[in-house]
Image (spheres, rainbow, N blue to C red):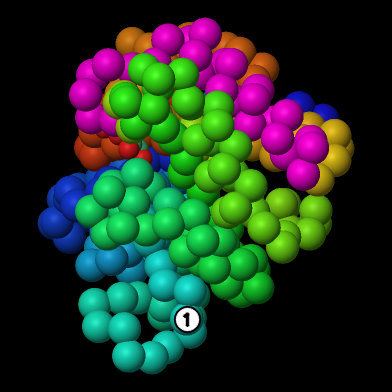
Amino acid sequence: MARKKIIFGNWKMNNTIAQARDFCDEAKVISDLAKTKDVIVGVAPSYLSLQYVVEHKESLWVFAEETHYADHGAFTGEVSIPMLQEIGVQGSLVGHSERRKYHGETDLDCNRKIKALIKANMGVMYCCGETLKEFDEGLAKDVIRAQVTVALMDLKESDLARVYIAYEPVWSIGTGKNASEEIAIEMCSYIRSIISELFSPTAAEKISILYGGSVKPYNIKGYLSSEEVDGALVGGASLTAKSFEELIKEI
Ligand code: 13P
């Protein structure tokens, strides 16, 4: 069965509750558009606007941008999976490069979070990607292999039903320097081959692998026209309903 394309917006530290409200005023339009195009559309808002977005999401998926692996405890400033579940959040991003860079998150931290999310029947959007230095040194595939292998450690094949992977080269995030379609296709299919090795060819066939990094209305179609790229994880162009609609219309 063909995998459905997925367009996911990562709002990062953008959009106040008032701005999230404006976005949600168009949630029905966006949901209808997604249905017409037969694609899955989701957003990951900041914690403060999560509840409002969940309550007004229509058929959009709503994930958190981040979560802690412990259910509760002395972790000042963190938000747990039960807290997210209580308000109806369906999953969380894990391992975004900005979390790795500014919060020192490691692949092992990501593994803990992924296991906790799966145990709670939540979705996982696992982000991986190499830095510019690693790319220039020809290390992209080695970096991705380590990031994927460690993050998915101890998972069963059936757990992968809740896991989505986003290949986001760090050098393409927020820079306007999007990776070429060739690079996106090569890396997404490389990740698929790793899944095949770690789990099985069937698991590799089923899992959705997205590209992220400066995806805009003018370039989204190129990525998604490949069978290897199952969608896009979008930052800047996902912030307003208008630009999000433009992305979906282009598919
Ligand atoms: P931009 O689309 O703004 O480059 O951000 C990509 C990203 O980091 C999504 O997680």
In the image shown, does 107 or 48 lie closer to the viewer?
107
Percent x, y for residue 242?
A: 25, 30
Residue type of the residue flagged with mark 1: Ala
Percent x, y for residue 68?
A: 42, 72
Magenta stretch, main secondary structure class: helix
Tell me the crowding category of disc 1: few under 14, some 14 to 19, or many 20 or more residues within 10 angstroms, Cα based.
Answer: some
Image height check: is 168 above or below 101?
Answer: above
Q: Residue at the front extreme?
A: 137
Image height check: is 217 above or below 95?
Answer: above
Quadrant location of ligand 1?
top left
- The magenta stretch is 173-198
Along the horizontal axis of the image, is 44 left or right of 71? left
Locate the N terminus and report the quarter of the image it occupies: top right
Res. 155 visible in picture = yes
In the image shown, does 81 or 23 lie closer to the viewer?
81
Along the horizontal axis of the image, is 148 left or right of 156? left
Q: Does the stretch in magenta take in 156?
A: no
Percent x, y for residue 246?
A: 33, 22
Q: Residue at the bottom extreme?
A: 73
Along the horizontal axis of the image, is 146 left or right of 26? right
Q: Residue at x 42, y 88 (%)?
A: 72
Percent x, y for residue 138?
A: 46, 18
Q: Residue at x 17, y 60 (%)?
A: 17
Residue that numbered label 1 is attached to: 70
Q: Residue at x 38, y 47 (%)?
A: 96
Along the horizontal axis of the image, is 197 left or right of 60? right
Image height check: is 3 above or below 63?
Answer: above
In the image shown, does 95 or 85 lie closer to the viewer?
95
